[in-house]
Image (tube, rainbow, N blue to C red):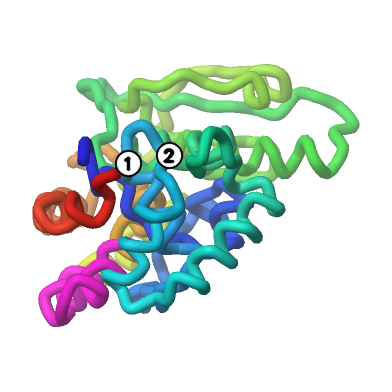
Amino acid sequence: MEHTASAWSAQSARSARSGSGASGPRPGGTGRTGARPLTARSIVLSTLLGHHPPQLPARALVRVGALFGTAEGTIRVALTRMVAAGDLEQRDGAYRLTERLLARQARQDDSRAPRTRRWHGGWEIAVVTSDRRPPAERGALRTAMAGLRLAELREGTWLRPDNLVRSHPAVVTEQCTLLGGAPRDDPAALAARLWDLDGWARQARELLAALERAQGPAGRFTVAAAILRHLVTDPVLPSRLLPADWPGAELRARYDDFERELRALLPRHTRT
């Protein structure tokens, strides 16, 4: 199986529908691992998100479900419901992800290996200049800003250090004016104001400890899925703006270890 576990994320129905990895500018302060029990839906989504191309016949998905103790009938019911909900489409005897979930996969891949550039002290700033935005447009912008790892300083003003390489979607360029600049005050203090860095680091260390304790493929899968969700909320700041002993790199490395473990385990279950 090619790239078997590159996006193994046991996300819930809410995260799959919203497409957002963060709910606000200060992620990570819960102090919990965020590990969620495996469901038939999460097993199916995670398997397809980790498979390239992201499509498999039902019999392969049933075999993966059996690996985690989920009955064939439960997997098949989940497949039917996911097609009805617009998360999957069925074509030529195979189930494949819809465009919305492919976008989720791209964000997760980026969270594992974010593209950065040398930081020279500049910040990117996005100021909302579009008038009379309906709620749907405001929500789409907020989701896009989370995906771009920008934080909201105040209503309608988003910013972050200019150290990431990525493009801005139309929902941002249509509603905002994009600027550049640098704070006069301590940039590390501003970063700490925009993101709960201590909270993010604390939860990352709890996840690392939970992965170490996890028993068997299913237990490790559940914790690894929570790790991937947590990585999506990493602001990916320049090192000089981060607290000492920032665990981001270690968390990514441990997830990569898990992926290699899973890659060795699963091919016989997804072979068609």
Q: Residue at x 80, y 41 (%)?
A: 136
Q: Residue 52: horizontal and vertical position, in percent?
A: 32, 34
Q: Is residue 85 above or below residue 226?
A: above
Quadrant of the rendering where the N terminus is positioned: top left
Q: Which mark is residue 242?
A: none
Q: Amino acid at mark 1?
A: His
Q: Is residue 209 in the magenta section?
A: yes
Q: Residue 152: horizontal and vertical position, in percent?
A: 57, 44
Quadrant of the rendered image containing residue 222: bottom left
Name the side, left or right, on which 177 lies relative to 75: right
Kindly state the secondary structure of the residue where label 1 is placed.
loop
Circle 2 residue: 55
Circle 1 residue: 51
Counting other residues with Cα less than 10 Å from the Cα at mark 1, is it few (<14), some (14-19), or many (20 or more)?
A: many
Q: Nearer the viewer, residue 97 or 253?
A: 97
Counting other residues with Cα less than 10 Å from the Cα at mark 2, is it few (<14), some (14-19), or many (20 or more)?
A: many
Q: Nearer the viewer, residue 96 or 118?
A: 96
Q: Which residues are magenta?
A: 206-225
Name the side, left or right, on which 235 lies relative to 4: right
